[in-house]
Image (cartoon, rainbow, N blue to C red):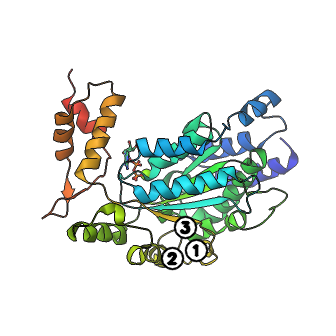
Amino acid sequence: MNSGKFVLLFFLLPFVTVEAGFFDFLERFYCRCDFDGFYDINRILSDKDDLQHFDSEELKKDLRKSLYGQHIAMKTIQKAVSCFMKDSNPTKPLVLSFHGPPGVGKSYVTKIIARNIYKKGEKSKHVHTFMTDYYFPHKDRARIYQTQLREWIHGNVSCFPHSMFIFDEINKISSELIDTIKPFLDYNPQVDGVSFNKAIFIFISNSEMNAITNLTLDFWREGRDREEIQITSRGLETQITQNIYNDEKGGFWHSSLIDQHLIDHFIPFLPLELKHVRQCVLSEMAHLNMTEDFDLADKVARDMPFFPPEEKIFAVKGCKSVRQKLALYADD
Ligand SMILES: Nc1ncnc2c1ncn2[C@@H]1O[C@H](COP(=O)(O)OP(=O)(O)O)[C@@H](O)[C@H]1O
Ligand SMILES: [Mg+2]
């Protein structure tokens, strides 16, 4: 360990607690960023091999096959990721922000993106998922988290430019913390000797997003096809940005990431209908090696709660807990 790291450890020691996440955070921070003594050269080279040849047609096929009922997300992600991955000299990292109710595929789609970029998919060392409650549990430690987060991202990107960072539950993170990574997301050729322009940043917001649900409901009530909904429909994108910018408790509250337009795409995920839940059940059947059974899929899907109370159109939990429900019907 060089003297710089020793000083940093010394500085952090008084704050070390046994709560989940903190040791893991440090361990990952040091192991991942360090080339002088913590990783051997073979390991580093095999890490680089983890990037696979990117094929935009494969990503398109994968999204079409695996992601149900999310036409806006499917199209935007396919185009944005393909364009970015094909660009040998991007001027900034790719920054995406996902919004929508629970269980509709926001986290799931990050796995689809990861498996199209890295050989080890979501399990790649270069995919870093930050869950707010786990990694940043104490609001009063904001300053320490800021330093750790910056160093961690900087260290990992300096080792591997195509790193991917996923911030789950951005609605729970402090806006100061998120704002500290702004220099990495901007049009900067380098920050402290490192270019971030090949990295991917994904923010996932799980906060109540009435704008998305209400718009989808309006289209349904008007008898219009949900696929007619666009990001610009009835000012949807503006509503999303205004909501998160004005949400005092959320990570984007008055954030410079928003007012300096550093987020490339705000992507709404729509609430799922019965037919999508049915598709999720069928997909789970395949995972569990069960014989495909459409009647059973229908039964399991109908067993899930739906809203609004009168019309019962959208699945309250999306496709969450579908596997658990299905297990109740599986033969012993
Ligand atoms: N739109 C979807 N298409 C296919 N599967 C989905 C979809 N939405 C959710 N699922 C299934 O439900 C699980 C939970 O969804 P997840 O993406 O974790 O929800 P969230 O939107 O809250 O992040 C996923 O792992 C996936 O199996
Ligand atoms: Mg999620």
Distance in Å between CA atoms under marks 1 and 3 = 15 Å
One can see residue 168 in this view: no
The part of the image, by quadrant, that contains residue 143 is bottom right
Q: Is residue 128 above or below residue 268?
A: above
Please tell me the numbered disc located at residue 258. Answer: 1
Q: Is residue 238 above or below residue 169?
A: below
Residue of label 2: 245
Please tell me the numbered disc located at residue 174. Answer: 3
Give the amino acid at mark 1: Ile
Give the amino acid at mark 3: Ser
> Mark 1 CB in 8 Å range of ligand 2?
no
- Which of 37/266 is in front? 266
Horizontal placement of 297 versus 319: left or right?
Answer: left
Query: Circles 2 and 1: CB distance less than 8 Å?
Result: yes
Q: Residue at x 32, y 71 (%)?
A: 215
Q: Position of residue 180 (x, y in %)?
A: 67, 67
Within 10 Å of the Cα at label 3, are there few (<14), some (14-19), or many (20+) other Cα atoms? some
Give the amino acid at mark 2: Tyr
Along the polypeptide, which appears first: circle 1 or circle 3? 3
Q: Is residue 143 above or below residue 322?
A: below
